[in-house]
Image (cartoon, helix red, strand yellow):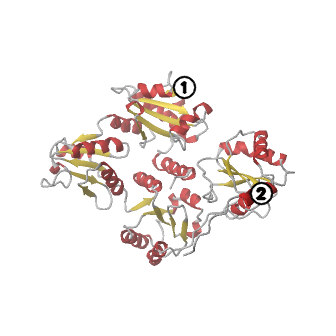
Amino acid sequence: MAISKAWISLLLALAVVLSAPAARAEEAPAAEEEAPAAEAVLTLDADGFDEAVAKHPFMVVEFYAPWCGHCKKLAPEYEKAAQELSKHDPPIVLAKVDANDEKNKPLATKYEIQGFPTLKIFRNQGKNIQEYKGPREAEGIVEYLKKQVGPASKEIKSPEDATNLIDDKKIYIVGIFSELSGTEYTNFMEVAEKLRSDYDFGHTLHANHLPRGDAAVERPLVRLFKPFDELLVDSKDFDVTALEKFIDASSTPKVVTFDKNPDNHPYLLKFFQSSAAKAMLFLNFSTGPFESFKSVYYGAAEEFKDKEIKFLIGDLEASQGAFQYFGLREDQVPLIIIQDGDSKKFLKAHVEPDQIVSWLKQYFDGKLSPFRKSEPIPEVNDEPVKVVVADNVHDFVFKSGKNVLVEFYAPWCGHCKKLAPILDEAATTLKSDEDVVIAKMDATANDVPSEFDVQGYPTLYFVTPSGKMVPYESGRTADEIVDFIKKNKETAGQAKEKAESAPAEPLKDEL
């Protein structure tokens, strides 16, 4: 299942909330006073981007928007890190691109920039591009990137090396070999290079150097250390694809915890980015029978471990972004919700611990009805641009017999705010045309129908009476919008002719 822009926006919000250090107001003036004479961060645009990438074997690029608050917060930290890393041998280059500039939007499209700020690591003159997944403050950026330019896997030659490298609060992956050569070693190093921005890797000839090490271990072997569940897990399959799957499956807790602990942040991102069905239990961690819920829920995760579903337990206080995204209310807690691979949602509000397993069984047996997030249908809808919600969008857009230009927007989106009066003007201009309607839907408060591919805001579609759907990609003035509608609209008669001339679908036998 493709990840929607709204979903990615939620993930980015989580990243900032969970990983960003608390702002220190008393330091703000000093940051302004210490502005460097020349920026260490390299400013790029579409004209010189490819040349810069080709010039540097290792470069980090921030794709930002000038209006983005998170980008403004990152800017001084990014600059401090760039100054420090410019002294590294060899220098580590930090660059930035204004992805909001029309000139640079092709770059944003090419590199799949879906939120701001997005940082990417360009290795080997751009032949290997990875997401930057490190800290957002200067000291953390420097430490993270210094590791990224070193070897993808570090050799562990002594117990002291193992102690220094293997942090019992993080995932660490070690290849244990009889010799540092051969297919298994080569494949391990290939995976380490590919996944180095996500995990730390090491390799050794001596298993007894490792925590809980055993000199008699049968080599070659991959051992993954982790701070949850069974603490370590082994694999002897060195096929590259199999090794990647092993790491992916083993590096997420059986039940991911959604709270304010930044140590859980990497697991949250993996959970939400997964295409598997997701079961999420939300409750108040500090009150009520939390331990009873936790015990039953972990047992359910173990019982259904062979199903294509991932489990999360979330604290109400930390989960406001998820509540907004799913259309949940605090008075429904404790609740359990499932989002399946087709984005259908199933909800059980005011759930009791002894109802969890039976409810999950009903889901797997296909006995639950989906839950849809929708604002109330407006009782009064007399503005030039009509309001549609999830509960009436199909009737309004597809069954009205009219030509409908529908906008999917987010209340916080600057571009949407700029477009709003323009759509009002276009709707007013077309008010006398009974075959045309301009409408809008808050895509953060309503489930967007699957017919529409909404990857950013605002997204506009033009739907004719015959059901033809056209993404609106023309100009953003009222005149251009009106011209587009006039050129593409159908009359009721034309729609009827198209429907009658369409080839009949072949009859199918019902089983």
The quadrant of the rendering that contains the C terminus is: bottom right
Extreme residue toward the left, this view: 216
Q: Residue 497: which disc? A: 2
**Most foreground residue, 230 or 160:** 230
Q: CA distance from mark 1 to mark 2?
A: 49 Å
Residue type highlighted by circle 2:
Glu
Residue 200 to residue 107: above or below: below
Image side of residue 435 versus residue 102, left or right? right
Q: Residue at x 45, y 52 (%)?
A: 269
**Most foreground residue, 143 or 325:** 325
Residue type highlighted by circle 1:
Asp
Judging from the image, what secondary structure is the residue with disc 1 in? Answer: loop
**Most foreground residue, 387 or 323:** 387
Question: How many C-alpha atoms fall within 10 Å of the one at disc 2: few (<14), some, or many (≥20)?
Answer: few
Q: Position of residue 241 (x, y in %)?
A: 33, 50
Residue 168 can be seen, yes or no: yes
Lower position in the chain sequence, tag 1 or tag 2: 1
Image side of residue 299 versus residue 324, left or right? left
Q: Residue at x 58, y 64 (%)?
A: 328
**Most foreground residue, 250 or 314:** 250
Q: Position of residue 495 (x, y in %)?
A: 76, 56
Judging from the image, what secondary structure is the residue with disc 2 in? Answer: helix
Q: Quadrant of residue 498?
A: bottom right
> Mark 1 against mark 2, which lies toward the viewer?
2
Q: Position of residue 384 (x, y in %)?
A: 81, 52
Image side of residue 183 versus residue 136, left or right? left
Image side of residue 121 versus residue 372, left or right? left
Residue marked by disc 1: 47
CB within 8 Å, label 1 to label 2: no
